[in-house]
Image (spheres, rainbow, N blue to C red):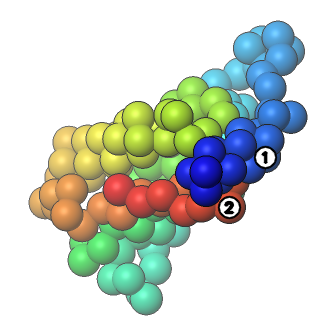
């Protein structure tokens, strides 16, 4: 009974989040990121790496070198170009996997920074629950 109640609460929390036809006509820079704004990636000394934030998503890449301003812009733009849509209890894992793959690809192939998925934490707030990969 508790599980069904939690699923109902999560579903009701996202009932008002709907993409409109006008959203499909906007440029790729204005892609939705689960109800928040655009991704903003910055170097963070507290994690010895890079943090990208866009409500309700947080991405930390730990123990990597500091990225240049241009690399941070590339990473932010690549994440913003993903059409994430609304995050819910049914699709959060697929979305987190896609975000993680994009970040890993950028670090390995665009920035030539040696890292792996164990250093990438991707979390999303779904209703009142936080899910991490």
Q: Residue 128, how many percent across, how many down?
A: 68, 61
Above or below, 120 against 18 in this view is below
Q: Residue 117, how many percent across, how many down?
A: 21, 56
Q: Marks 2 and 1, Cα distance to the nearest angstrom?
A: 9 Å
- Which residue of the protein is positioned furthest toward the bottom in this rendering? 46
State which quadrant residue 15 falls in.
top right
- Which residue of the protein is positioned furthest toward the front in this rendering? 1
Is residue 54 in sight in this rendering? no
Above or below, 89 against 60 in this view is above
Q: Earlier in the sequence, mark 2 or mark 1?
A: 1
Q: Residue at x 64, y 30 (%)?
A: 85
- Left or right of residue 121, residue 109 in this image: left
Few, some or many C-alpha atoms within 10 Å of disc 1 (few <14, some 14-19, many ≥20)? some
Q: Residue at x 56, y 41 (%)?
A: 89
Q: Residue 107, how many percent across, how many down?
A: 26, 52
- Left or right of residue 70, residue 115 in this image: left
Q: Which residue is mark 1?
A: 13
Is residue 117 in sight in this rendering? yes
State which quadrant residue 23 falls in.
top right
Q: Residue at x 42, y 60 (%)?
A: 132
Q: Which residue is mark 2?
A: 128
Judging depth in this view, the residue of 41 and 34 nearest the camera is 34
Few, some or many C-alpha atoms within 10 Å of disc 2 (few <14, some 14-19, many ≥20)? few
Q: Residue at x 33, y 83 (%)?
A: 48
Q: Which quadrant of the figure contains the C terminus?
A: bottom left
- Asked whether disc 2 touches disc 1, contact meaning CB atoms under 8 Å apart, the reply is yes
Judging depth in this view, the residue of 29 and 116 nearest the camera is 116
Q: Which mark is residue 74?
A: none
- Left or right of residue 29, residue 26 in this image: right
């Amino acid at each position: 009974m508790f599980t069904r109640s939690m699923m109902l609460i999560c579903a009701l929390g996202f009932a008002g989040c709907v993409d409109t036809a006008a959203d499909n006509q906007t440029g790729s820079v204005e892609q939705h990121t689960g109800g928040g704004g655009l991704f903003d990636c910055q170097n963070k000394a507290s994690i010895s790496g890079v943090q990208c934030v866009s409500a309700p998503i947080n991405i930390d890449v730990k123990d990597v070198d500091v990225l240049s301003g241009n690399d941070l812009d590339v990473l932010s733009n690549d994440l913003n170009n993903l059409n994430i849509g609304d995050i819910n209890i049914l699709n959060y894992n697929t979305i987190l996997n896609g975000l993680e793959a994009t970040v890993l690809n950028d670090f390995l192939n665009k920035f030539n920074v040696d890292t792996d998925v164990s250093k990438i934490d991707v979390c999303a707030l779904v209703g009142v629950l936080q899910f991490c990969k």
